[in-house]
Amino acid sequence: MLRGAPVLSSLAAALVAASPDAILIADADGHYIDGNAAALALLGYSREALLRLSVADVVAPGPIWAAEEHAHFLREGAWEGEVEVRTNDGGLVPAEARAIVVPGPDGSHYVSFLRNITDRKQAEDRQQQSEERFRTAFTSAAVGMALIDLDGRFLQVNVALCELTGYTEAELLARTIQDITYPDDFAADLAQMQRLVAGEIGAYQMEKRYLHKSGHVVWGHLSGAVVRDEFGSPLHFIGQLENITARKQAERAVQESEERFRTAFEEAAIGMSLVDLDGHYLRVNAALCELTGYSEVELLARTFQGITHPDDREMDRAQLELLFAGQIPAFQREKRYLRNDGTAVWVRVNSALVRNIRGEPLHLFGQVEDITARKLAEEERQASLEAAQAANRAKGVFLDMMSHELRTPLQAVLGYSEFLLIAPKDSLTDEQRLDISYIHQAGGRMIALVNQLLDLSRLEAGGIVLAAEPVDLAQVIEAVRQDITRQAAAKGLEVRIDLPESLPPMKGDAERIRQILLNLAGNAVKFTHVGHIRISAGAAASGGVVIEVSDTGIGITAEALLHIFEAFHQVDSSLTRSHEGSGLGLAIAWKLVQQMGGNLSVISEPETGSTFRLHLPTRQR
């Protein structure tokens, strides 16, 4: 077996040859002098090639070549460790090595035992990579992770778990799972852990509460499992913890919102309902049951169409089509329900369509208010209005008839009195002529009063139709000036007209505008003893025209101003006796202005004067 001398016995040689481990023998200079079949297979050399090599050619640099290790080997005569050996193809093979010094008559020899540990190294590498991956996943995980011993003590924790609980790593490693679990939740968690150890389950999940270091509660979703050794014995627990506090708060908010809705729904003073898309009641409150006369069970077996008055169902259908099509978000309408006893009840219904997050219709939400009392009141008011309108029409007919009956004799009185007044001077005495003039004036006033009554009656009954023709406002104001000039001059009053170079074009009823202005200007002359009457006009900043009639007369008290535009109202009965009038002129003017779409207002100060302000649109109604 060895060159030059039988170093080993034949038995030893047989053992070396049969060994599965590589055995190499080198002389004192480190040159190989022998090797078994396993060594030749490991290194890939032939026997002849091996014997041309030394230990330095085969064993790669490593711990065994360190001076301290080499001195230890020579001193102790043995060395164990791991080396890498070079193969014939240039590769390196990891090997578990044991070297011994064997003294002999020709000097010491070195015997090396090598075992190929490539598979073990690869397995160790894989294990190391797996552990590295686990360590990276464990440390970098976005959710909390922990290894926990069978007594509940933390063995390892990651950053996410520290952030979730508010503890540092050192603080957690000094605590148990029970220390940071909300007391009411620990029993359930412990029961699951015991089932894991017993092998009843392979893993479990649960939602539980943890106590943050600051004292507040943190909700977590826990996934737990047990790690076992190769014999199946439990080693420790591994847990993953996801922070679900925000979700729990959102769920709580939804729950509270639903509770508020339930309370508002059930306690509402008006009827409330949820209805499916076919009209069947899904939920109703006590107020709706009371309104309809049905019990909750009876309503839930019906549709809203079934208790709706037949004449009102078509409008419901049309509104629902618009609602389902997304053309309107909700609708409100007044309709009739048929109560359980067959009577009709008027209701105001507010309906809205509830959709899911995808915009798909889910159900209808309805609010129902009993408006029967209001409807009855409206019907009574309508009946009263119709009766009043009928009375007005009857009054109009009466006034038309009376005006005709009064005009006929009055016209005869006026005609004959005028005829007598224009007769030759010597046909009547002065006293007779004065008396006849009184008769003529009284007849004229009576005709004017009849005309005013007729105008007022027609205005109240809507019987006056206003013209819509171009109006020359300057010309209308000039006609009014001419109408009052003689009376004003007789009292020594000045009539002033202030107009801009041009006024906005207007369309309306020129004769009725003249009637209004003549009434205002006539009153100004009537109640002014010293000073002037002023009529001005101009474009209004808000559109239309403004006409003002002002005077320096006796003025109007604040109390009288409150009723100034009421029919038959007179500022002062003593003034009426000294200034003729029926109290209808301003009422007629007010109603005419309203029909034109304008406004009439007044400001006045006793003993200083009054100003009536007339605002008219350029295009009247």
Image: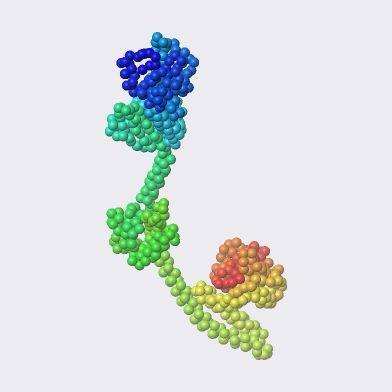
Residue 356 versus residue 96 in the image, above or below = below
Q: Relative to residue 477, is residue 295 drawn left or right? A: left
Choose top left, top right, bottom left or bottom right for residue 537: bottom right
Q: Residue at x 38, y 16 (%)?
A: 2
Residue 351, given in percent of the width and then of the height, sits at 40, 58
Instruction: Identify the image quadrant of the N terminus.
Output: top left
Choose top left, top right, bottom left or bottom right for residue 344: bottom left
Q: Relative to residue 164, is residue 467 drawn left or right? A: right
Residue 196 versus residue 609 in the image, above or below = above
Residue placed most toward the observer, 352 or 235: 235
Q: Residue at x 58, y 67 (%)?
A: 599
Instruction: Identify the image quadrant of the C terminus.
Output: bottom right
Residue 15, given in percent of the width and then of the height, sits at 32, 18
Number of marks present in the image shown: 0
Residue 513 versus residue 542 in the image, above or below = below
Q: Is residue 178 visible?
A: no
The colour scheme used to paint the residues is rainbow
Q: Is residue 186 visible?
A: yes
Choose top left, top right, bottom left or bottom right for residue 617: bottom right
Residue placed most toward the observer, 571 or 454: 454
Residue placed most toward the observer, 602 or 283: 283
Q: Relative to residue 491, is residue 454 drawn left or right? A: left
Q: Residue at x 34, y 30 (%)?
A: 227
Residue 10, given in percent of the width and then of the height, sits at 31, 15
Residue 434, given in percent of the width and then of the height, sits at 65, 83
Q: Residue at x 56, y 76 (%)?
A: 466
